[in-house]
Amino acid sequence: MEMHGFHYSAHLTDAVRSTARHEKHASQLHEIKPNERYNAQHVWLSMMVFINPLVATLPQHAHLMAQMGCFNGYTKEPRECGTGPEGKGETPLPDEYKPFQTSSEIQSKWEQWVHQHIIVPQVK
């Protein structure tokens, strides 16, 4: 993959695998077809995340990489720029770069949509 301009991200790989393992340990197995449980074993065992820097640096993708970029004094705890007593003179992150707020209801609706659009191969 790296020969094609992609860079392996150990940090993102660990994050994705950790999420999949957490679902398993939390018994959050998903039912794709009636009476069939699904877990993401293939994700926590073999998922690898690669980033294409040429694509990631395009302006239309800039919002995907945003994080709180300012820190509190010596504690180095992240905080939103332009806030708190140390925020004077800092440039806050534009609203369009901030992550959208979600809830368990929104997550549930998203999972329902995904389940409705999964194409399950017919076994003969």
Image (cartoon, rainbow, N blue to C red):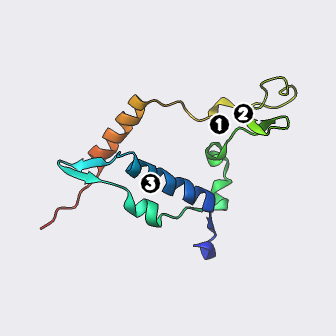
User: In the displayed structure, does residue 75 sit left or right of residue 22?
Assistant: right
Q: Residue at x 12, y 68 (%)?
A: 124
As rendered, which of 108 and 65 lies closer to the eye?
Answer: 108
Q: Above or below — where is 66 with respect to 45? A: above
CB-based contact (under 8 Å), mark 2 and mark 3: no
* Mark identifier at residue 93: 2
Percent position of residue 44, x then y: 45, 60
Question: Which quadrant of the figure has residue 83?
Answer: top right
Distance CA(mark 2)–CA(mark 3): 32 Å
Cα distance in 3D space between marks 3 and 1: 29 Å
Of helix, strand and loop, which one carries label 2? loop
Q: Are marks 2 and 1 in contact (CB under 8 Å)?
A: yes
Identify the residue at image location x=65%, y=47%.
65
Question: Residue beneath label 1, please?
Answer: 97
Sequence-first tag of 3 and 1 = 3
Is residue 14 shown above or below 107? below
Q: Amino acid at mark 2?
A: Leu
Residue projecting furthest to the left: 124
Assign a secondary structure to mark 3: helix
Classify 10 Å Cα crowding around label 2: few (below 14), some (14-19), many (20 and above).
some
114, above or below 10, in the image: above
Q: Is residue 94 left or right of residue 38?
A: right
Instruction: Report the residue marked by disc 3.
Output: 21
- Foreground: disc 3 or disc 1: 3
The three-letter code of the residue at mark 1 reads Tyr
Q: Secondary structure at mark 1?
A: helix
Instruction: Quadrant for residue 41, please give it.
Output: bottom left
80 w.r.t. 55: above or below: above
> Observer-nearest residue: 64 or 31?
31
